[in-house]
Amino acid sequence: MPLQKVSRADILKSSIRIFRQRGYYRTSMTDLADALGLTKGAFYHHFKDKKTVMKEALQMSASWFDRKVFAIAYQEGLSDQEKLSQISVITYKAFVDQPGGCFFANTILETAHVEDTFRPEIMAFFKAWEKALLHIFSGNIAPENLNEQVEQIMAEVEGSIILMQLHQNPAYLKKALDRSLTYLSLPANH
Amino acid sequence: MPLQKVSRADILKSSIRIFRQRGYYRTSMTDLADALGLTKGAFYHHFKDKKTVMKEALQMSASWFDRKVFAIAYQEGLSDQEKLSQISVITYKAFVDQPGGCFFANTILETAHVEDTFRPEIMAFFKAWEKALLHIFSGNIAPENLNEQVEQIMAEVEGSIILMQLHQNPAYLKKALDRSLTYLSLPANH
DNA sequence: GTCTATACACAGATAGAC
DNA sequence: GTCTATCTGTGTATAGAC
C-alpha cells in the first residue's frame, strides 16, 4: 500500500468548502486537515500557514468563476439574453448545490474591519464579475446608466444570497437572477 | 471616589460596535472588556457568557431599528414617499457613521452554517424591516408584485452594503437607497 | 463591582521519527 | 509524505481577595 498522495489542488478544493461554510477565523487547521484525512503535521507539509491556504483558496475559487461563469459573457455566437441566462443558471447551481453562500462576500464581511489580507483576491472576483456584466449590457443600456445597472444586479444577487441563507430557501436567489434577465429588455433603457 | 458603575445598556452598546466590526467568533471577551476599561473578571460579573452578550446585543440593535427606523412606516400624516425617504436617510446614516455594515447580515453569514444560536434574533430584524416596507408599498403596488418588490429592496440594500465595504465607498449604499424610492412611482405598478 | 490569578481547552505552528 | 509529540499563545470561564 503506497502512501496516499494529496495534491495541492485537492487540498484547496476541500478547504474552500470548509472556509466558505465556517468562515476564516472559525475554521481551524485541524478542521482543514481532518476533512482530508490528514493530521495537522501532514497538512503543514503542504502549506506554510493558514493565511496562504485561504489566499490560494480564494484564487482557485475566483479562477473557477472566471472559466465556468464569466467566460460565457465573451463567447461568440450567443445573444446577450443567452449569455445572461446561462450565467444565471450556473450561478444558481453553484450557490445552491454547495452550502455556504458566496465565499467572497462572506470573507469580505468577516475580515474587512480586521485586516486587509484578502482584499486583493476578493476584489479580483468582483471586478471580473462586473466586467462580464458590463460586456453583456453595454449594447443594451445607455452608457450613462450602464455602471449603475451592473452595480444593481451584483447588489441584488449578493443580497438575495443573504436572504436565501437567512430563510434557508434558494427561491430568493432564483428570483434575483430572473430579475437580472428582465433588465436586458427594459423599454426605458433603449 | 466611588466605584464606577457600568450599566448593562452601556456594555451592550459598546459590545455591539465591536461585534459588528470584528464578528462574533473573532471578538474575544478581552476585546469586549477592554473597550469598557474593565477586566475580563469584571465583565463576567455582568454577563454569564459570550453567547448571552451577543444575543442581547442583537436584540438591542434590532430594537433601535424598530424605534428609530421602522416606526416611521406607521407614522400618521406622512406620505409614502416621505416615509421611505426618511427611512432611507436614517438607514444611510446608521450604516455609514458606524463602521461594520449590517450587524445582522454579518452575523447570519458568519454563523448560519456553524450554529443556529442567533437565527431568531436576526430573523426578528429582517421580519420587522419587511413588515415596514410592506406597509409602505401596499398602497402603491399590485398585491401580486408586493412581496417580490419588498424582497428586492432588502436584497439591494444588503448587497450594496457588501459592495460599500468592499470598495470602501458609501456611494453604493446611497444609490441602492435612492433606487428604492423610485419603486414607489413605477408606472408598471399602477 | 472590580480586581488578580488561574484552570482548562484549543488555536497555529514546529520538530523529528518512520 | 505522514505521523506523534510538543511549544507557545490565547480563548472562555471561574475563584476568591479587596
Image (cartoon, coloured by chain):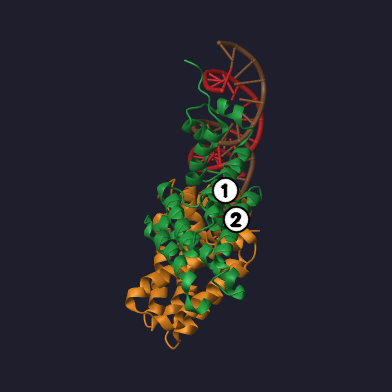
Chain colours: A green, B orange, C brown, D red
Residue marked by disc 1: A62
Tell which of D6 and A67 is nearer to you.
A67
Which residue is outermost to the left?
A: B144
Residue at point 44%, 64% (across, down): A176
Residue at point 55%, 30% (across, down): A7
Image-based side of A32 in relation to B31, left or right = left
User: Image quarter for residue B125?
Assistant: bottom left
Q: Where's residue A151, x and y in %?
A: 56, 66
Tell which of C5 and A75 is nearer to you.
A75
Q: Which mark is residue A128?
A: 2
Q: Tell me the subunit letter for badge 2.
A: A
Q: Where's residue A103, x and y in %?
A: 52, 49
Q: Amino acid at mark 1?
A: Ala
Q: Are marks 2 and 1 in contact (CB under 8 Å)?
A: yes
- Tag 1, which secondary structure? helix
Q: Where's residue B17, x and y in %?
A: 58, 59
The CA span between labels 2 and 1 is: 9 Å
Mark 2 vs mark 1: same chain? yes
Which residue is outermost to the bottom?
A: B77
Q: Where's residue B100, x and y in %?
A: 58, 59
Q: Can the viewer see residue B69 in this picture?
A: yes
Residue A5, placed above or below residue A32: above
Residue A23, placed above or below residue A131: above
